[in-house]
Image (cartoon, rainbow, N blue to C red):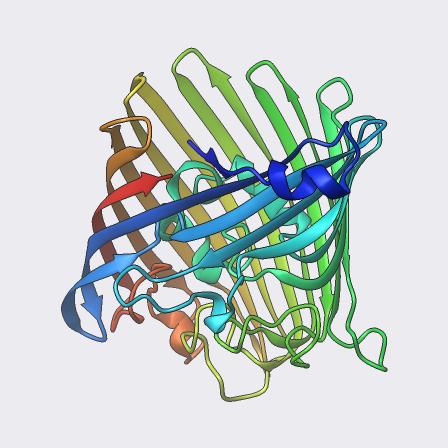
Amino acid sequence: MKKTAITLAASFAIAAPAFAQNSVTLYGVIDEGIDYTNNVGGKHLYELQSGYAQGSRWGLKGTEDLGGGLKAVFQLENGFNVNNGKLGQGGLMFGRQAYVGLANDAYGTVTFGRQYDSLVDYLAQTTANGNWAGYLFAHPYDNDNTDNSFRVNNTVKYASPTFAGFQFGGTYSFSNDTNFANNRQYSVGGQYANGGLLVAAAYLQANNPSSSAGGAVNNGGDENCLAKRLRVFGAGVNYTFGSSTAGFAYTNTNITQPLSTTYISGSILPTTGTLNALKFQNFEVNYKYQFTPALFVGAQYVYTLERFEASSVQSPKIHSVGLMADYNLSKRTDLYLQGAYQHVGGDKTGTALDLAYVPGAADASSSQNQVVVRAAIRHKF
């Protein structure tokens, strides 16, 4: 779907050795659609929204052959809103990705810059939202980052070659602070693929995330988690048999001593009161059926058990259901229809956690239930 748009052979021919092969690829995704939400603060809402099945983006990536199996690699990726042309990720020019590094087929790849963590690289592929569905199917508040609501800055990443179907990797993100541990991040993950089987696991920890502007976790102020520590781990499995793909994923998120519980999704979560910890356990089952090469349908169910630890402990429970159909008009253009439903039950916290909020909705419901339906077109280049 992506094509080489620029070849820098002329400029490199003078300075580079004869063996060098250099290329730059321009690529992108434009995802635009109409959303209907049945309850936004008690009212119906129709709106035009950009980037749900995939975030709208354009980017450049390139390689230079350095000889002996070694290559220089880079990627710059911009996120934007189709409706108004604004930059995404808090207004960053290359907010989705920005890195440079070295790659070797035998030893793996090391890159430096703003990148995805190991949850996104490995585990997310076993979830519906991280594989074929996108934002509306994210776990509540994208609490485990499997829908990459935040990237990590100042990051050194290693990705291994594939050994008999197994690949692993990890990240370390510097705080860039005299307090070495203040707003740093590290993650590890791996996956095994053989035939139709995919098994993956990952772990992430961030210390004092978003506590400093120049640290590991900070996307320009619009996607913050202020806490002493953010810790996420999980595992998942997908199995493809014939035209069917079935999956299961489990993730566990622990936000220790939140300083502000504005987490990932703006101001949906409570910002007053004292919290010792906020925890999420997500249990997901998903299924996709490929009717023809051009048409698939998919379904997802997620059970989320929360633990709200303040002066007392409450355990809200969230049930989320998603359905999607996607039809390819061509190799680069498709139409899709999505629906997501959420119901919040269990204990009451006396906060906005008691209200339903489907990821991607304009705001929380005024009740325990919320439905979002989206019809959209997506074009890749």
As drawn, is 266 to the left or to the right of 218?
Answer: left
Q: Say which residue appears at 48% left-offset and 58% top-offset.
A: 78
When the figure is inspected, residue 260 is found, relative to residue 31, above or below; the finding is below
354 lies left or right of 325: right
Q: Is residue 243 above or below residue 378?
A: above
Answer with the quarter of the image where residue 202 lies.
top right
Residue 235 is at least partly visible in this image: no
* Residue in the picture at 79% in, 34% down: 17
Q: Given the current orientation, which residue lies at the most extreme top position?
A: 242
Residue in the picture at 48% in, 43% down: 26
x%, y% of residue 52? Answer: 35, 51
- Give the left or right position of residue 180, taking residue 116 as reference: right
Residue 361, image x, y percentages = 30, 63
Q: Is 168 left, or right, of 331 in this rendering?
A: right
Q: Quadrant of the C terminus?
A: top left
Vertical placement of residue 9 versus 95, above or below: above
Residue 181 drawn at (x, y percent): 82, 73
Where residue 190 sits, quadrant-wise, is: top right
Which residue occupies the foreground of this view, 87 or 264? 87
Q: Position of residue 277 (x, y in %)?
A: 63, 73
